[in-house]
Image: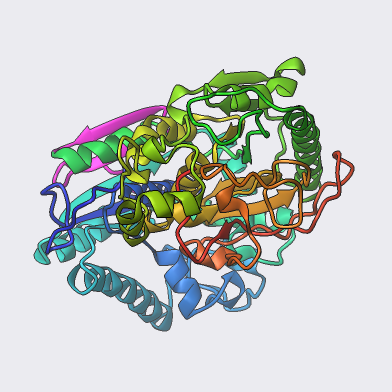
Amino acid sequence: MAAPLYTTDSGQLFHAGKIIIICVGLPARGKTHISRALERYLHWMGVTTQVFSLGDYRRRIIGGAQQLPPDYFTHGMTPFPRSFKNPTEYKSSIGPKSPETEALRRRIKDGCESNIVNFFNKDRGQVAIYDANNGTKKSRNEVAERFEREGIHVIFLESSCDNPDIVDANIRSVKISSPDYKGWPPEKAVQDYWTRIRTHEKHYEPLEELTWPYIKIINVGEKIRLNAIQGYLQSRIIFFLMNIHNKYRTIYFARSGQSLIEHSFKADSDLSPAGWEYAKRLKDFVLERRRRVQEERKKMGIPAEEKRLVVWTSARRRAYHTAWPFHQEGYRVMEKPTMGEINPGVWDGLSPEMARQRYPDEWERFLENPYAHRAPRAESYHDLAVRLEPTIIELERERDDLLIIGHASVIRCLLAYLMGLPAHEVPAVEIARGDLVEVVPASYGVHSQAFHFWSGPGRGVDGEGQEDKGNFYENYAEATQGKKKASGDDFSGFPSGADTPLPTGAGGTMASATPVERSLTPVPPS
């Protein structure tokens, strides 16, 4: 479900109270990926949620792996050899931590947990996700008792994996790109991280105690075990965790091509000649882009297995026929009726000026709350977001690369979900016809880029192509001149991936990568 349209004085929804989800697990078991994905989904539900990563907090206080004290990750009773200076050597040593290091670790842990308490008490948060190892019974009991004294319901979330291939793939695809290993050679980073894991394994105690509610995820969703989980919100969390994975994949978004009758929701017309040309150009561009990304990942030493490409479209003719060149090439194309464009109701076929003149009161209410307002006999963006939830769950389940060819309003909602945007910003997200948006969900954020591949008829940008003045719902939002171009930081702190080399020769001139755009004013439904 999308965020509800009501709020409460406490800031809490579903009579669920305050909840802290405390992650448990060895390094490279997918804890960060699960935490960020769950945070994204709970945001979509309207629940005030935040991930608190002990590793991120430590990096802010100390720095990356190179700045750590040499005994920061050591365990055992053997005296620590102070002669070790190499990062790979020092983490393989077994010895007690110095008093200074113990005090530093305690200060970092207390500081991170104090931020969690402030999140509940000062920021009116409802769900905190504590991303840390918490590998011993003693440490788990300490942290659980601390938050229970604050009146916060505690749930442990353990991610365990006994398949070394999965762990190694996770290290190579995720951990070597983490802030700890910025600038490190890939193989050296992999070796160092395996050493860190083996050090933790000697003292790790699996989650077995029944004192607290828990969720155990085994081998990235192969099995899930529960203890004392109850209530609506907790059940929704379980439902979501049963449908996610941490496989690397890329999600592409593109508008459908120009249709013969652009301004009518009811017409469901076929593609125009320019629309068919657009469909062929899109196919060529996407396939070239995938080839270039595959080559870049191989150069970086990242596992680059050949991924299948699946194409999703709505059941509208112009969307499905935009995917027709992919079907002819043998790619799987799936129609999703839930991905139909937003229903404009009485505003069907009207330009913005006509809508303002004929329905001035409705127009004013729309400008006041473009996400929640529903024109007569129409859908609001909230209605559309609720309709799209099954599609969002399928999107989370999909393990292959995915191309979504759809309508502007649908793409706005899906991008807002992936980027973690608040509901009121959904109508302001822009996706121009002729742009391909590439999104890569990752453990440390969502990387996004936008590429321009088409400037022909139907683009609807001032000075480019032909602008359909009657197309209130498809093209009005795409006049990007003078609009804000958001940076990666605008998307709830998720980094932008605009440094990836761009493909050329895919049927058109390739511009430099630009982030997804958001307008400074609300965008009418499309």
What is the x, y in percent for residue 484? Answer: 58, 67
Left of 212 or right of it: where is 297?
Answer: right
Left of 297 or right of it: where is 333?
Answer: left
Magenta-drawn segment: 205-230
Q: Is residue 386 visible?
A: yes
Say how the picture is coloured.
rainbow
Q: Is residue 208 visible?
A: no
Of residues 326 and 115, the one drawn nearer to the viewer in this rendering: 326
Asked where in the image residue 19 lies, by quadrant, the reply is bottom left
What residue is drawn where x is 20% and y is 43%?
A: 233
What residue is drawn where x is 37% and y is 75%?
A: 108
Residue that lies at the very extreme toward the front in this rendered image: 358
What residue is drawn where x is 37% and y is 38%?
A: 346
What is the x, y in percent for residue 43? Answer: 34, 52
Of residues 205 and 419, the one drawn nearer to the viewer in this rendering: 419
Left of 500 or right of it: where is 18?
Answer: left
Count every numbered label the image shows and give the total: 0
Main SS, magenta residues: loop
Of residues 25 and 389, the one drawn nearer to the viewer in this rendering: 389
